[in-house]
Amino acid sequence: MLSKKYSLGFFPTPLERLENLSKKYPDYNLFIKRDDNSGLASGGNKVRKLQYFIYDALEKGCDTIITAGAQQSNHCRQTAAACAKSGLECHLLLGGKEPQDYNGNLLLSHLLGANIHFTKNNRKGEDIESTKRELEAKGKKVYVVPYGGSNLLGASGFVDAVKELKEQLNEMNLEIDYIFFASSSGGTQAGLKLGVDLFGLDTKLMPISIDKVGSGGKSLDEVVLELLCDGKQSLGIVKDYTIEDAKLIRGYDNSGYGVVTNDERRAIRTLAKTEGILLDPVYSGRAFYGMLDHLENKKLRNNSNILFWHTGGLPANFYYSKELR
Ligand SMILES: Cc1ncc(COP(=O)(O)O)c(C=O)c1O
């Protein structure tokens, strides 16, 4: 499963102790994994997945990439950057109507040279196949990166990431009891789970659900379980995965995808003011809100070591400027 990849980012990403925040919550030791510093047009978790997709696309002789997401999709912005760097033509299918002003990730995707198609109510790749046919009719050799980059190949990026983390933890002589992160299309979560089992880390994953709507008629737990079952075959993991292994932590996604409330704003400001680190309002800010709730309401073992996996998303702050003030 861990096939070859095209180098796109800065790895390993830093692993740091959150000194000031740990003082604020003295029952816990808090750490952060800085995938927001993974390079490539403001970084983020999707760079890890795209290294595999771009390699595969070039191997297959493709000249064009299609992927899909919301207008403020970090995944689409990072795909546009990956295409720019590897010389591929990029087509992004973004939900909603074309706005008058381009802002945040949408503006960056445009600057990175992507061809942008606005797909109204379809923000999860429903129009990928028809667009692919249109581009093929024009002679393009098209490679599809699925919604969120979440198939098994994309998840490989996060199997790798656990190996990277394990090496850092060994060097620091540290064990991590809980890892919090934002889970939305499932590839990050599935890859981390497969990696934790493959490399034998004794850590509990805490995937915070960002978007309560599933995709392709399935719940996200089902999507993750499918990836786990496929992944264990190729990685040789001897384990019977059940839906329990794929469960997301819900309740922080009640306002709906991309709806920014006081909870996300407070979470962003807390990390910004204590550590000088910026989250995003849709994904990492919401996941951090979930983690703060666990710390404040003592839902975790005392004295445990807790890692927040920062998955990036900075540009979306500029789109949500009104909600964040
Ligand atoms: C900043 C950020 N964090 C987390 C995620 C979730 O990753 P996944 O889609 O693999 O669940 C995304 C997905 O777009 C993202 O942009």
Image: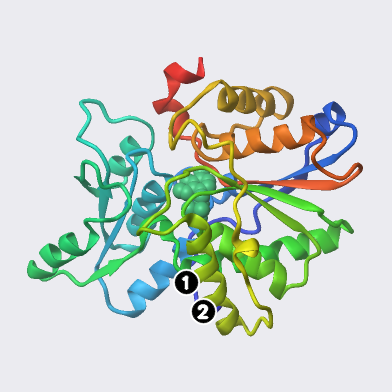
The amino acid on which the numbered mark 1 sits, given as a three-letter code, is Leu
The residue that appears at 72% across and 51% down in the rendered structure is 179
Can residue 143 be seen from the camera position used here? yes
Badge 1: few (under 14), some or many (20 or more) residues near its Cα, within 10 Å? many
The residue that appears at 30% across and 66% down in the rendered structure is 144
Residue 36 drawn above or below residue 21: below
Give the secondary structure at mark 2.
loop
| Image coords of residue 83 (percent x, y) | 33, 58
- Check whether the beta carbons of the residues at disc 1 and disc 2 lie within 8 A of each other: yes
Q: CA distance from mark 1 to mark 2?
A: 8 Å
| Image coords of residue 89 (percent x, y) | 24, 59
**Residue 3 badge:** 2
Left or right, 43 with reference to 296: left
Left or right, 302 with reference to 132: right
**Residue 153 badge:** 1
The amino acid on which the numbered mark 2 sits, given as a three-letter code, is Ser
